[in-house]
Image (cartoon, rainbow, N blue to C red):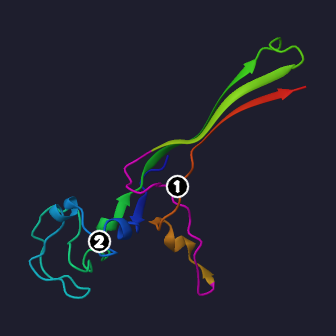
Amino acid sequence: MFFGNEIFNAQKYWYVFRAFDTNVRRDRLANSAELDGPCIGSGCPGRVTNPNPKYPRLDVSDACSRQLSRYWVEDGSYVRLRSIQVGYDLPPAFVRWIPAARVYLRAENLFTISGYSGPDPALPAWDVQGAGFDLRDQFRGVDGGSYPASRMVSIGFMTTF
């Protein structure tokens, strides 16, 4: 369980914005911010005319859309069932030549409840090195694209002889 976490979702650069000169989803066209001035270079003058946009301003090169803003930050609070094991001790007379036996079912990462749009709100620390010192703390809370935790279910049998 982790509450109050905020995540900078850097993956939006690839799946929301037009990084490859592709088509734009209808939702993005209808719900993006509109400015009353042009977007020139990396600056975005003008006022937003759409009062509650879901996306930043859409422009030909997406220079305005990709600028850092609160749009990139999401609530990363989550609740996860990380591990659970259920077992049953077989009675001693179940199998004559086995004095003790146990059957169990174990599950890891069974579910995660979160409002985060990325695949996994529990981000690993990046292994970032730069200029001879460790930069991992500077990248905590940044989702740069990590593989989510795998779900695993196993059935087991333990015994003594």
Query: Where is residue 148 shown, x and y percent of the image?
Result: 52, 55
Report the residue marked by disc 2.
22
Determine whether, in the image, residue 103 is placed left or right of residue 96: left
Which span is picked out in magenta? Answer: 113-132
Q: Is residue 94 above or below residue 36?
A: above
Q: Is residue 88 above or below residue 73?
A: above
The answer to which image quadrant residue 73 occupies is bottom left
Q: CA distance from mark 1 to mark 2?
A: 27 Å
Q: Amino acid at mark 1?
A: Pro
The answer to which image quadrant residue 45 occupies is bottom left
Residue 128 sits inside the magenta stretch? yes
- Residue at coordinates 52% horizontally, 62% vertically from top-left? 146
The answer to which image quadrant residue 5 occupies is bottom left
Residue 138 sits inside the magenta stretch? no
Disc 2 secondary structure class: loop
- Residue at coordinates 21% horizontally, 79% vertically from top-left? 60
Locate the C terminus and report the quarter of the image it occupies: top right
- Mark 1 surroundings: few (<14), some (14-19) or many (≥20) residues within 10 A: few
Front-most of residues 155 and 85? 155
Determine whether, in the image, residue 42 is placed left or right of residue 101: left
Residue 148 disc label: 1
How many numbered marks have been drawn onto this rendered protein structure?
2
Dominant secondary structure of the residues highlighted in magenta in the image: loop
- Residue lying farthest front? 22
Q: Amino acid at mark 2?
A: Thr
Determine whether, in the image, residue 52 is placed left or right of residue 106: left
Determine whether, in the image, residue 107 is placed left or right of residue 56: right
- Mark 2 surroundings: few (<14), some (14-19) or many (≥20) residues within 10 A: few
- Residue at coordinates 56% horizontally, 65% vertically from top-left? 125
Q: Is residue 58 above or below residue 39?
A: above
